[in-house]
Amino acid sequence: MFSFRKVYESAKRVGASPTLAKEIAETIKREAFPGIKTSFIYKTVKKLLSKKVPKSALRFSLKSGMRKLGPAGFAFEKYIGEIFKRLGYRVKINQYLPGRCIRSYEIDFVAEKDKLIYIGECKYRNLSGDRVHSMDVLANYARFLDISKRP
């Protein structure tokens, strides 16, 4: 179902000006019909963004681009590592860090810059609508606490 507000906000979120976002939403509003598919709206927004602001069109299709990394998570971990590298961090992928209670945790990446250290567990989902459960988040937070309290 078409929502002017959702189309407008989505276009703005990826970098379209308020004027362009309104223009895109108005165009789709004129083309909308009962039972319009979300995929049709998505493709139309992407096409309109591509014509006016190609950089925004790339951002708009980021989720589908991420899915093209493949079914396994390792490519995603490397991708996240590259983002940190380009931000000036020293990055190590697939590290084992000691905790206070557990001898060794496998960590997807460690990124260091100045005195700031990030440790990360990447949760990659290839299927649309797939979710990371709260117990996974809580378990990773517990790992972080254990690692940060090591002697």
Image (cartoon, helix red, strand yellow):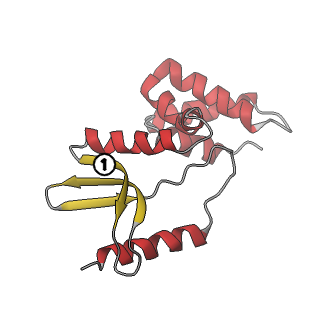
Residue 76 x, y percent position in the rendering? 48, 42
Residue 139, relative to residue 107: is it above or below? below
Going 74% across and 28% down the picture, which residue do you hit?
Answer: 31
Residue 134 x, y percent position in the rendering? 59, 70
Residue 10, relative to residue 47: is it above or below? below
Going 45% across and 34% down the picture, which residue do you hit?
Answer: 16
Which of 146/15 is in front? Answer: 146
Residue 143 occupies which quadrant of the picture?
bottom left
> Would you say 59 lies left or right of 25 here?
left
Amino acid type, residue under disc 1 in the picture:
Lys
Quadrant including the C terminus: bottom left
What is the crowding at mark 1: few (fewer than 14 residues within 10 Å), some, or many (at least 20)? some
Q: Which residue is mark 1?
A: 92
Answer whether residue 52 is visible to the viewer in this image.
Answer: yes
Which of 113/129 is in front? Answer: 113
Going 25% across and 60% down the picture, which residue do you hit?
Answer: 117
Residue 31, relative to residue 14: is it above or below? above
Looking at the image, which residue sits at the far right?
A: 34
Going 61% across and 60% down the picture, which residue do you hit?
Answer: 132
Q: Secondary structure at mark 1?
A: strand
